[in-house]
Amino acid sequence: MQSIDVISQWLPTLLKGASLSLLVALTALLISLVLGMLIALSRLSDSRILNGLGLAYTTIIRGIPELVLLLLIFYGGQQFINDTRFAWADKNGVDVSAIDFSPFWAGAIIIGLIYTAYMAETFRGAILAVPSGQREAANAYGLSRLRIFWRIILPQMTRHALPGISNNWLVMLKATALVSLISLQDVVKLSADAAKATGYQFTFYLFAGVVFLCFTTLSIIVFRYLERHYSIGYIRSS
């Protein structure tokens, strides 16, 4: 078939785009896991300020569409920073050049910040699922808060958090398709370029869809293994 010959010509380029999409997703995942845990802990802290800041972040981020946030921060934030710098430079007689955000880092950081809000709620629920009596017993033995979290809470909360992390990761992985709108040469952007150049719209968009399907299928297999691993020793209720 001619469509197969056409896509084979673009295959090396499309595979590079697919690897870039996966790299964006993995970078965003790392950001969301680290920041999500910090915000979850702030939501559970005794400090009203930290609790309020964490609640405000998760409420605002989850209430605004991902596409709007991506465009707002990448284009709007870039323009705001440059306008502010130029205004300062004119006032002080200094020459400055415009700042251009890296599409890769901008996309990875923005998506990571968006899903930080969802990871935070996943971690908060998982921490609350750990019996409070265990924390109280650890306190009675004189363990520090860091040691209690690292040795008692974290291993147990992981089992409760994995289904939520898995779901957030799958949605995040598909959300990386949005970075094509900020000119990142990911698999979606390259598929669109190839479709326009060759006229094979269905073929190349189908290829992009299959790439994401392969990523998500592999992810589901990995997370099922992790869930089984962290469930060893626990009795499942019927």
Image (tube, rainbow, N blue to C red):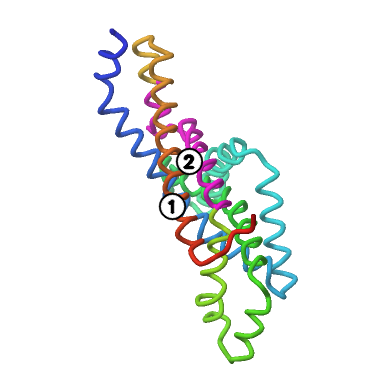
For label 1, the SS is helix
Mark 1 and mark 2: Cα distance apart in space? 19 Å
Residue 126 in the image: above or below residue 93: below
Which amino acid, by three-letter code, is at mark 2? Leu
Image position of 100 with respect to 177: above or below: below
Q: Which residues are magenta?
A: 163-192
Q: Is residue 58 left or right of residue 28?
A: right
Residue drawn where x is 73% and y is 64% of the image: 52
Instruction: Kindly identify the residue that appears in the image at 66 percent across and 60 percent down.
Output: 125
* Residue 47, image quadrant: bottom right
Residue 94 part of the magenta-drawn span:
no
Magenta stretch, main secondary structure, is: helix
Indicate which disc, 1 or 2, sits on the residue closer to the N terminus: 2
| Residue labelled with disc 2 | 173
Q: Position of residue 98 (x, y in %)?
A: 45, 43
Q: Nearer the viewer, residue 22 or 141?
A: 141
Find residue 21 and report its horizontal and vertical position in percent: 40, 38
Q: Residues within 10 Å of mark 1 (few under 14, many from 20)?
A: few
